[in-house]
Image (tube, helix red, strand yellow):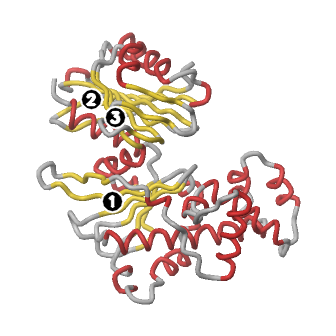
Amino acid sequence: MLSAQKQYKKFNKKSHGSFILGADLGGTNTNLGVFGIKNNNPELLLLFHFKSKELGSLHHAIIETLDCIIKNHKIRITKACIAGAGVVSPDRSSISITKLDWNLTRKELSGNTGLTKIIFINDFEAIGYGINMLRKADVAVIKKARKIPEAASVVIGAGTGLGKTTLAYDIHYKSYVPLPSEAGHCDFPAQSKQEIELVDFIKKRKKIKQNVSYEQIVSGIGLENIYLFLRKNGKINPTKSTKEADKAKNKPAVISKYRKIDETCRKAFEIFRDAYAKFAANCALDALPYGGIYIAGGIAPKNKDIFDANFVKKFEKCHERSDVLKRIPIYLIVNYNVGLLGAGFLGARIFGKK
């Protein structure tokens, strides 16, 4: 069942006081990591990758991983921090993974795997904690500005959906703590004629009676909505690439593939980029993140070129507080494992000591 195992870092088992399991569960990929705790700090040592839809249940992947590390490394783990793209219960004892129809509980998972201590967190909360573990090479600068140490930061990210978290600095732990948010479901503030027409199209297509959210535009679903809106307008002549995108089951992937050579795909990404910049600006005005805005999610690393001068220009475009937005740096997270690192970070804080 195990599709890939990677030794993330060379290590000596005796150099770590304890070990924990971290997990990052998504609709497409499930990643498990073994973290060694050294001086109260987590280090990702081993990485295990699964295709989510090939798993009957999460406990199969956990059992296989735990058996592997016992057999090959003589490490026994009983504690885990599990991050997932879904709704977490207030006491962190259960989580529902939206795209997988998984309803995971601490009691059931413990009974099936032998893990004795488990905590669940939201996937975007995990990315927020993961910011504490990023190195310089893990981020690319989109917009230069003076970063203020220990100032608030914001993480946003478009993938299957749209996430956001504000990070507050904890002086006791000397690290950032993410605050929960559902900002991706905020109303999209249509301003131009095209944006109003796009919102009306989405309402009709999705049979939405209420307001259209940012997530319906700034996400994989949103990219598909934008593309279909442009195709219905019929103002751009279709090409061979357009017709391939029309038939594709995974439209966002094909739109991304042809965004530089097909006019419809290019225009779809242009609208997507501008809406993404507007969302980033609104989040910035809300939190004043002089520690920076970090962009995560599945779409950004695969389409880095959309975060260009036009993105920055759109971000800074504000009638009343453009001066504030110009002072905020923006970074792109290029480390795919940031969510897993965040699960390990929180797990070490909670379970790190023997």
Q: Decide: marks 2, 3 in contact (CB < 8 A)?
A: no
Compared with 79, 278 (above or below) is below
Q: Is residue 204 left or right of residue 30?
A: right
Query: Which label belongs to residue 166?
Result: 1
**Distance between the alpha carbons at the discs numbered 1 and 3:** 25 Å
Residue 122 placement (x, y as % from top left): 40, 43
* Name of the residue lying farthest toward the front: 209
Q: Quadrant of residue 294?
A: bottom left
Hey, what amino acid is under mark 3? Answer: Leu
Hey, what amino acid is under mark 1? Answer: Thr
Q: Quadrant of residue 83?
A: top left
Q: Residue at x 57, y 55 (%)?
A: 299
Which residue has dot 3 on it? 44
Residue 107 placement (x, y as % from top left): 35, 20
The kind of secondary structure element at disc 1 is strand
Quadrant the C terminus occupies: top left
